[in-house]
Image (spheres, grey):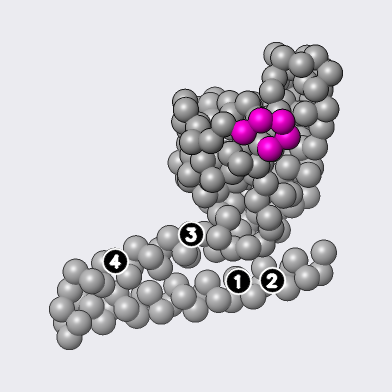
Amino acid sequence: MTVRIKLPKRRPFPTKNPIGDNWSQHKDDLREDFHKHCGYCGSYDGFSHTYFEVDHFVPKSLFSKSGNIGFCQYDNLVYSCKFCNNIKSSKWPSNDEKIPNLNNKGFVDPTLAIYDTHIYRTKSGSIRWLTDLGKWMVEVGFKFDERDFCVKLLWELNQLRISFLFLVDEAKKYDPNSQQHKTIIEKAKESAFHYTLYRNELDEYYKSL
Ligand SMILES: [Zn+2]
């Protein structure tokens, strides 16, 4: 399956028009356009496991020298978890702002469908590669292999969250005294129970870092 549940899509006309180094003013638009998930690893931003940041796809350090890309240029920005943003950092193997990847090293804009042709998510939630460029992104670009424990945990938590919300909606369709309603509520309780266990595990894990 794909790393992100839904492909992010940047709007052509952002709500705000910041200048200088005020790119964070684009964060609300980006959050919506990236469906509240990290553009790179697909983690949901509601678990407060990390701060979500605005990443510059082509690193600032590179284009600030050439001056062809603006700091606030919306089509170069990515809604990203702190981990992906920090690990990606200023890596840009081609050293050319127009060439995101070269000789199977570098990145793919996460709003392009081809992002999902290089890496994928396994049934247990890990992020693995499909191509040599994908291997570079997993092992070097974002270090998804080193982060496997929390990548899987965050994915599992998000699945439980989605399943719980679905069941709560389903339950509303039935008479509260009906057997169907009771069965759905039991399933929802089960999801909530597992969610709490995973959530505690995640909190403990981040405390240990
Ligand atoms: Zn991420």
Q: Secondary structure at mark 2?
A: helix
Judge whether 3 appears above or below 181 on screen: above
- Can you identify the residue that label 1 sits on? 199
Q: Amino acid at mark 4?
A: Asp
Disc number at residue 135? none
Tell me the distance, in whole angstroms, between the alpha carbons under discs 3 and 1: 12 Å
Q: Residues within 10 Å of mark 2 (few under 14, many from 20)?
A: few
Visible in this render: residue 147? yes
Q: Quadrant of the C terminus?
A: bottom right
Q: Is residue 21 magenta?
A: yes
Main SS, magenta region, reads loop
Q: CA distance from mark 4 to mark 2?
A: 28 Å
Residue ID for mark 3: 159
Q: Which residue is mark 4?
A: 169
Q: How far is the residue under mark 4 from the one under mark 3?
A: 16 Å
Q: Upstream in the sequence, badge 3 or badge 2?
A: 3
Q: Earlier in the sequence, mark 3 or mark 1?
A: 3
Three-letter code for the amino acid on which mark 1 is drawn: Arg
Residue at 46% from the left image edge and 41% from the top image edge? 6
Seen from the viewer's position, the closer of residues 68 and 15 is 15
Looking at the image, tell me whether mark 4 or mark 3 is earlier in sequence order.
3
User: Where does label 2 land, which residue?
Assistant: 203
Q: Position of residue 140 (x, y in %)?
A: 80, 36
What residue is rendered at 76% in x and 28% in y?
A: 59
Asked whether mark 2 and ligand 1 are closer than 8 Å, the reply comes as no
**Which segment is the magenta one?**
18-22
Residue 22: name its quadrant: top right
> Which residue occupies the foreground of this view, 150 or 33?
33
Question: Where is 5 relative to 20, above or below?
Answer: below
Amino acid type, residue under disc 2 in the picture: Asp
Tags 4 and 1 in contact by the CB under 8 Å rule?
A: no
